[in-house]
Image (tube, grey):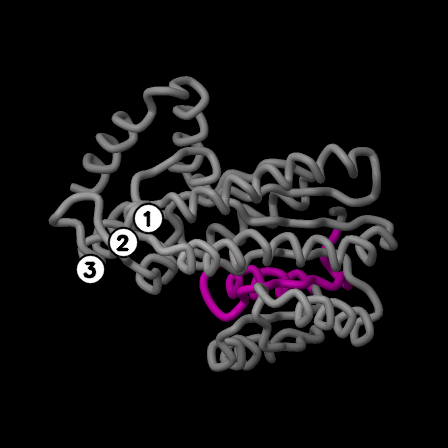
Amino acid sequence: MKTFRGKTAVITGAASGIGRALAHELAKKGSNLALSDIDEVGLTKVEQELKKFPVKVEIDKLDVANREDFEKYANKVVDNFGQVDMVFNNAGVALSGRFEDLSLEDFHWLMDINFWGVVYGSKFFIPHLKKRPEAALVNVSSVFGMIGVATQSAYNAAKFAVRGLNESLRAEYAGTNLMIHSVHPGGVRTNIVRNAKFQSAWEEDLDHNTAVELFDKIARTTAEEAAKIILNGVAKKQYRILVGPDAIVIDAVSRLLPENYTGLLEWLTKVVAK
């Protein structure tokens, strides 16, 4: 992406965390913004924060799991802005629990948002992105799209699926005006763990509150830093964008020790958390 100025960017999950930070960074760079989230209150707050920038900002409540609503939303954005140059499929939720303790409804809830939300955002916006001289589709996976972790079976499944989708799209659109970006954040200081559904723990003493405390200790990257890393990757046309030093370590360890990374990463987590 040669420049962000004058471009139109779509961001899902824009009411907080990485989505909100992306909105601020893109507004600074002169991008017009179509922002959506299920959280109307948070989204309105972000809209107010962005009024200081001379860019067009529109907000919409959107449940990314709803296919019909997402398709209508894509058409609305194109009608209102006349173009779409970048799409950041960022919206996501977390769910923690042993596989046996998770209901099928739990699995469907998470997959509908974290996987199908990305599929819909890709499917409904790609036809519009293809019309632009240069365009970017930025789909957020996770380091949990690289490694499997106990109590994260649903989250792992969704993020591995997004990673696989990205790999395929990258091959299909190679050599075209549309660049595919696969984003893999490590521990980023957002409320995703605090707001997660928590069904059961792996260890008896690791309840939801303890999990939040542990995450707050090991999550070293701010949402603002994450947004800058992501946009730098988009500007440089990087396919895989690793967010945070822990993401770089996890990527390396999972490649070097594909069958034995679990123990090493658990040890590293305990060391960092002290």
Residue 10 location, quadrant: bottom right
Residue at 12% over, 49% down: 205
Magenta residue check for 198: no
Q: Are marks 1 and 2 in contact (CB under 8 Å)?
A: yes
The circle drawn on residue 219 is 1
Number of other residues with Cα within 10 Å of mark 2, as a class: few under 14, some 14 to 19, many 20 or more: some
Amino acid, disc 2: Asp
Number of other residues with Cα within 10 Å of mark 3, as a class: few under 14, some 14 to 19, many 20 or more: few
Query: Going from the N terminus, do you reach mark 3 or mark 2 first?
Result: 3
Point out residue 195 in the picture as x, y percentages from the top left corner.
Answer: 34, 64
Q: In this image, 222 relative to 213: left or right?
A: right
Residue 37 location, quadrant: bottom right
Residue at 67% over, 75% down: 57
Q: Which residue is mark 2?
A: 216
State the extent of the magenta-drawn residues as a range: 3-30
Q: Are marks 3 and 1 in contact (CB under 8 Å)?
A: no
Q: In this image, 225 relative to 169: left or right?
A: left
Image quarter where the C terminus lies is top left
Helix, strand or loop under label 1: loop
Q: CA distance from mark 3 to mark 1?
A: 15 Å
Q: Which residue is mark 3?
A: 209
Question: Looking at the image, which is closer to me, 96 or 8?
Answer: 96
Point out residue 116 in the picture as x, y percentages from the top left corner.
Answer: 59, 55
